[in-house]
Structures are given as C-alpha cells and as structure tokens.
Amino acid sequence: MNRMGGLKGLITGAAGAIGSATARRCLKEGARVLLVDHDASKLNSLRRELCEEFGVDGDYILCQQADVTDPDQMQKLGAAAVRAYGQLDFMFANAGVEGPVQDIGSYPNASFESVLKVNVSGVFYTLKYLEATIADGGSILITSSVVGLKGSARSAAYVTSKHAVVGLMRTAAKGLAARRIRVNTVHPGLVDSDMLRRIEVGLQELGVDDPRGSFMSATPMGTTITVDDVAHAAVFLFSNESRFVTGQTLAIDAGYLL
C-alpha cells in the first residue's frame, strides 16, 4: 500500500471520526500528515494512538491545534505547514459540526450562526490561508454531506452550510485550475457514527419513532456506511490517480440520493 508515497498533507477536524480514519488511511498509503483540530486533548490522544499503531515516534506524525473559525490561527497554521513540509500535496478541509435538530420556526438563531461559522467560514479561511501552501498539481478536498446535494427537514444550519461549501469548492476549482490543483467535495451519507446517533436522538425528541428505520427505507442498499468508506474515497482524490478529477461532488451514500 503505497498509493500516496512521498505525499504530504494536512487534515482539519483530524480528531473526529472521518478525520482520524482518513489520517490513518493516508499513513498506511505512505503519506505524511499534519493533523489539525481545535481540541488539543483529542488531537494528542490521536497522535499517541497512531504513533503506537505505526511504530513511529512523535516527530513523525505532526499535530497543530487550531480553530478554523479564527483567521489569525489559520494564517499561522499555513506558516506552520510550510515550516513542516515546505509545500503540501493535499489538504482535507474536514472540520465541521451538525447543530441541533429543530424545525426552522424554532431553530435557535445563535446555533444557526455558529454552525455556519464553523462549516462555511471555517472552510473559507482554510482555503484562503492555506491554498498558497498547496503544490502545483495538488489536491484539496472539502467534507460536505448528502444533504449538501439534497434538502432535509429540521437541520437548517447543517443543510445550508453543506450546500454552501459546494459553492466554495467550485469557486476554488476554477481559480486553481491553472495550477492543476484539483478541488472536490465528498458527500458522506448515513455514516455509522456518534453524529448520526445524536441526530436520531434529536428526531426522537421531536416525535419520530424510528429514525434509523426511516433512513434505511430511503437508502436502496439498506445500510449505513463507515468512516473507512469515506477515507478510501479521500485517498483516491488525494492521490495522483485522480489527477484530472476536479469540481466534482462525490457521494458515498449507499444510494441515498437515488
């Protein structure tokens, strides 16, 4: 497994389910990765876990605490990435939050604004302050969601934010095409994760008896997906195998969007 041998990259939201699975897969494929998260404790725990798993010391797997909603911190992160690797071959703008499950009429204003701050402004700052660190011919991937391609009730902020990052992706893909930097979004479906379980609890509190059953009945393959399924797709989009794939919205959803 050496599809990414010699490549160097950065992952935001690295301590989360998709971020950590993708970091692990990139390391298995021969890449070096700078792990970024706002939660220093979870980030350091992930680093120790990966160092033990891969039999390397702490200098091999790099970490940087940063809040994607803070432009100053993101600018400093860009400088740290350059110090660490010179230039990046790939970047995964993956940090995000889902927000509460509520109808629009009762959706908290502060929650709407905070979700968009992380999911949209955070991606914007990641692109703005880190695109210059990407080598020509590199790859940028942004985490969206199936609800970034399809509406969903009771998740106003999350749905809005995941649509919005598709616009950022398409803007960046056109703007960076001359440097052969490809930019894409990945759209996970029903990922078996803590986030899905929080959504199910929120729906139950609103009177939905069997959220999981409703999700499965709307999914032709009748199954959730795993974080590893997303990580495998990310590796393809980071690697040179996808060297002319740009401006695309890749859904990994077991048919949910059909």
Image (tube, helix red, strand yellow):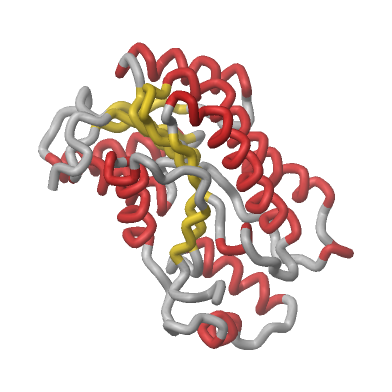
Image quarter (top left, top right, bottom left or bottom right) of the C terminus: bottom right
Farthest residue, direction right: 105
Could you tell me residue 200's position as x and y percent? 59, 73
Q: On the rendered structure, is 39 left or right of 119?
A: left
Seen at 34% across and 40% down, the residue is: 243
Q: Quadrant of residue 7?
A: top left
Q: Nearer the viewer, residue 63 or 26?
A: 26
Q: Nearer the viewer, residue 249 or 201?
A: 249
Q: On the rendered structure, is 166 left or right of 3?
A: right
Q: Nearer the viewer, residue 234 or 53?
A: 234
Vertical arrangement, residue 221 with respect to residue 194, above or below = below
Q: Quadrant of residue 53?
A: top left
Callout count: 0
Q: On the rendered structure, is 74 left or right of 113?
A: left
Seen at 60% across and 17% down, the residue is: 72
Q: On the rendered structure, is 197 left or right of 121?
A: left
Farthest residue, direction left: 55
Vertical arrangement, residue 49 with respect to residue 252, above or below = above
Seen at 53% across and 69% down, the residue is: 197
Seen at 67% across and 75% down, the residue is: 203
Vertical arrangement, residue 48 with respect to residue 86, above or below = below
Q: Nearer the viewer, residue 172 or 120?
A: 172
Vertical arrangement, residue 61 with respect to residue 147, above or below = above
Could you tell me residue 77's position as x and y percent? 47, 20
Could you tell me residue 3's position as x and y percent? 19, 43
Could you tell me residue 101's position as x and y percent? 70, 65
